[in-house]
Image (spheres, grey):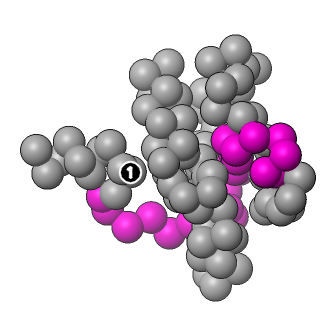
Amino acid sequence: MLNFLKSLFGSGPKVNYSDLINRSVIIMDVRTKREYQDGHIKTSVNIPLNHLKDQLSKLNKDIPIITCCASGSRSSVAKRILKSAGFSEVYNGGAWQSLEYKIRKG
């Protein structure tokens, strides 16, 4: 049960996001366009969660993806969608502001 909850909410082993950013990586913000316009990580791309399944064919499965949103809930769902579509290296970055801080902090 604990492993299920960890996978559901994207927790598990600690991820060094700064190291990931130093590689070729996509930061995918899955909030609405309006939320994204109100603030986002500069290098992120906005694919709202409700459009993600329609955009899967446009994404490269060989590039790691970090999902983020307002709190971590939608990014967790996005991670599950990507994993079920065959994307192997997907990370739930949680709330975009926290992720931005982790990236800057190094």
Q: Is residue 2 left or right of residue 52?
A: left
User: In this picture, which residue range is highlighted in magenta?
Assistant: 12-36
The extreme left residue here reads 1
Q: Residue sitting at 70 percent across and 44 percent down?
A: 31
Q: Residue sitting at 65 percent across and 78 percent down?
A: 101
User: Where, by quadrant of the figure, is residue 83 drawn?
Assistant: top left
- Type of amino acid at the residue the image marks with label 1: Gly
Q: Which residue is mark 1?
A: 10
The extreme front residue here reads 34
| Foreground of the two, 74 or 103 | 74
Q: Residue sitting at 26 percent across and 51 percent down?
A: 6
Q: Secondary structure at mark 1?
A: loop
| Foreground of the two, 93 or 73 | 73
Q: Vertically, is 58 above or below 39?
A: above
Q: Is residue 87 left or right of residue 4?
A: right
**Residue 34 visible, this angle:** yes
Q: Residue 77, how many percent across, how many down?
A: 48, 36
- Residue 104: in magenta span: no
Query: Local crowd at mark 1 within 10 Å, few (<14), some, or many (≥20)?
Result: many
Q: Residue sitting at 55 percent across and 58 percent down?
A: 71
- Residue 28: in magenta span: yes
